[in-house]
Amino acid sequence: MATRPDKQQIIDEVWDDARVESFLHRTCHDPDLDPDFFVLWQAYQAMREGDFRRFLRMYVAAGRNLDAVNERGETVAAMISTHRHARPFIDALVAAGASAPGSDEPASGDAP
């Protein structure tokens, strides 16, 4: 995919904590989608691994659900498990307390 000549390409942009944290305040306008899933999905799509790990600490501290599901009952970890470059993101999710993809049990410490 070619970029437009008038579109400047930004590489290795630094995300400060305020920008990472701003994802916690994103609003989902679909009433059928869990807001926790929406926020986590948006962060996965937009962030690099290091920024995502920082975001996960903020997300957990805010009391958000790492195992929130979409309309098909999939967690973010399960949904991205087929993505080619998702392994570091899945590892970050599991390290933060999310259930591993394919696991029917909640992460340790979570109530059933």
Image (tube, grey):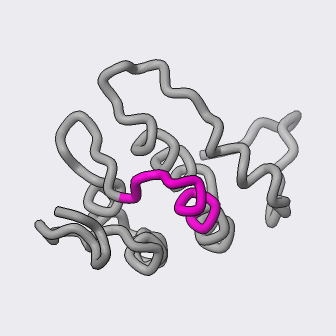
User: Measured along the vertical axis of the image, is residue 103 above or below residue 24?
Assistant: below
Where residue 27 sits, quadrant-wise, is top right
User: Measured along the vertical axis of the image, is residue 64 above or below residue 71?
Assistant: below
Residue beneath the point at 28% across and 40% down: 70
Q: Is residue 61 left or right of residue 75?
A: right
Where residue 100 sits, quadrant-wise, is bottom left
Where residue 83 sits, quadrant-wise, is bottom left
Residue beneath the point at 15% across and 69% down: 105
Report x, y in % for residue 11.
80, 61
Residue beneath the point at 35% across and 55% down: 76
Q: How many marks?
A: 0
Q: Residue furthest left?
A: 104
Name the one closer to the observer, 48 or 39: 39
Name the one closer to the observer, 69 or 89: 69
Name the one closer to the observer, 10 or 43: 43
Q: Is residue 17 left or right of residue 96?
A: right
Residue 61 in magenta stretch? yes
Residue beneath the point at 57% across and 51% down: 43
User: Measured along the vertical axis of the image, is residue 68 above or below residue 97?
Assistant: above
Report x, y in % for residue 44.
52, 55
Q: Where are the magenta residues, as a range?
A: 56-66
Report x, y in % for residue 99.
28, 69
Viewport quadrant of the C terminus? bottom left
Name the one closer to the observer, 104 or 109: 109
